[in-house]
Amino acid sequence: MLPPLVTYIQRGLAHCYQEDQQSWSHIYHLDGRESPNESLPRQDVFYSLNVILGLASLGRDAWEGEYDLPALLQHNARRMLELPVSVYAYGMALWASAELGVVLESETFSRIRNFVTDREKWKNFRAQDAGIILIGMCEQKKAGYTGFDETIHDFFALVMNNFSCRSGLFFDQPYGFRRNFASFATQTYLTTACYHYGELFRNHRALDVADRAVRKLMSLQGPNGEWPWFYFVPKGIVADTYEVYSVHQDGMAALFLRFAERRGVAGARESLIKGFNWIFGQNQLGQSMMRPELGMIYRSVIRDGELCSKRKRVIRAILHALRTKNNGYAPVADLTLRRECRSYELGWVLYSFGTREDLKEILYHPEFEKNGQI
């Protein structure tokens, strides 16, 4: 019998699924509008690959009869090549394919392989691109594919040369002033990539870099378990806390913390649990982030007035970096919810927690068994 966490997330994914497009939607709005699903094709396909990864991690019994996951993988990977997707989508296609145990169609795979092994392109890859592509290469290697053997070690060297920083955090891009400001997603994917590579090849440098990044990130985790959104990398400080994204709390932090747990990094398990409890209402708003009647999770907590623009957030981040420290948390009265859910978040929750048996306080939390209206 599947734990309540899994059945809750499956319910949410059913609402996000667009049968006519064979994909999960970019946004499911939670503001009461008549047509809540919003499609943006280039995001739909990436999010769908992320969902496929999460469902695949559960095993066939969790999706067979509900979705034809192998066909959805091929469809979205093919479609990805026709759209202006982010570079990291190529890595996600490799990762999802390996997790599902399904080889991508020959032409699709050939185009993806040629893209990610083109060394001319590497110099322009941003951190998230490099992180997910490195994970995809590692997972393909674990699945038995040897075609990346000639490039994977050079690609890891590129990650270290372009993105590693003495502060313990990772830069966002290889060059320019903007590289100094990096999101939590940047930290997540590169830390996780170092763990994947380090464990696969028994590379102590990669594992040590990942452990150091985890310790640094945990030292910057907020008092309610929140993972700040934006960092000033050279000084290893928080540039801006908001917005605080649910996906960081319930899915993405666990990508690296589960490795850290296995390696005995002190505080990793406690950090993971505290972060997830933020979803259940142990946050600044004192409010659950869940919509149980839909199997959804509100996307984030954000400063009121900043839902549609990042300008104030960017200015604030630069000022905080110049002052060396973040000036703290916004008053509760100045905060609001971003009332939407993203399907990729639900995919990450499944991937990070769906097969765990040791975190019953999360998997069987009463919030996952509610079905009524909020």
Image: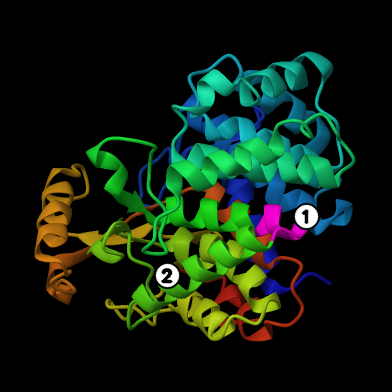
In magenta segment, residue 199: yes
CB within 8 Å, label 1 to label 2: no
Which element is circle 2 on? helix
Image vertical order of residue 29 relative to residue 355, above or below: above
343 with respect to 144 (left or right): left
Could you tell which of marks 1 and 2 lies nearer the N-terminus?
1
Residue under the image location 83 percent in, 17 percent down: 106
Distance from Cα at disc 1 to Cα at disc 2? 23 Å
Q: Position of residue 275 (x, y in %)?
A: 46, 75
Q: Which is in the foreground here, disc 1 or disc 2? A: 1
Which quarter of the rendering shows the N terminus?
A: bottom right
360 drawn magenta: no
Quadrant in the picture for residue 208: bottom right
Q: Main secondary structure of the magenta part?
A: helix
Find residue 371 and report its horizontal and vertical position in percent: 57, 70
User: Magenta segment range?
Assistant: 195-203
> Label 2 neighbourhood size at 10 Å, few (<14), some (14-19), many (20+)?
many
The amino acid beneath tag 2 is: Leu
Q: Nearer the viewer, residue 86 or 11?
A: 86
Looking at the rendered structure, the kind of residue marked 1 is Leu
> Which residue matches tag 2?
217
Does residue 318 appear left or right of residue 171 in this picture?
left
Q: Which residue is mark 1?
A: 200
Residue 14 image point, x, y percent? 64, 48
Of residues 166 and 42, the one drawn nearer to the viewer in this rendering: 166
Q: Is residue 268 above or below residue 58?
A: below
Residue drawn at x 84%, y 47% as measured from the top left: 142
Where 209 falls versus 40 (above or below)? Answer: below
**Residue 105 falls in which quadrant of the image?**
top right
Q: Nearer the viewer, residue 360 or 156?
A: 156
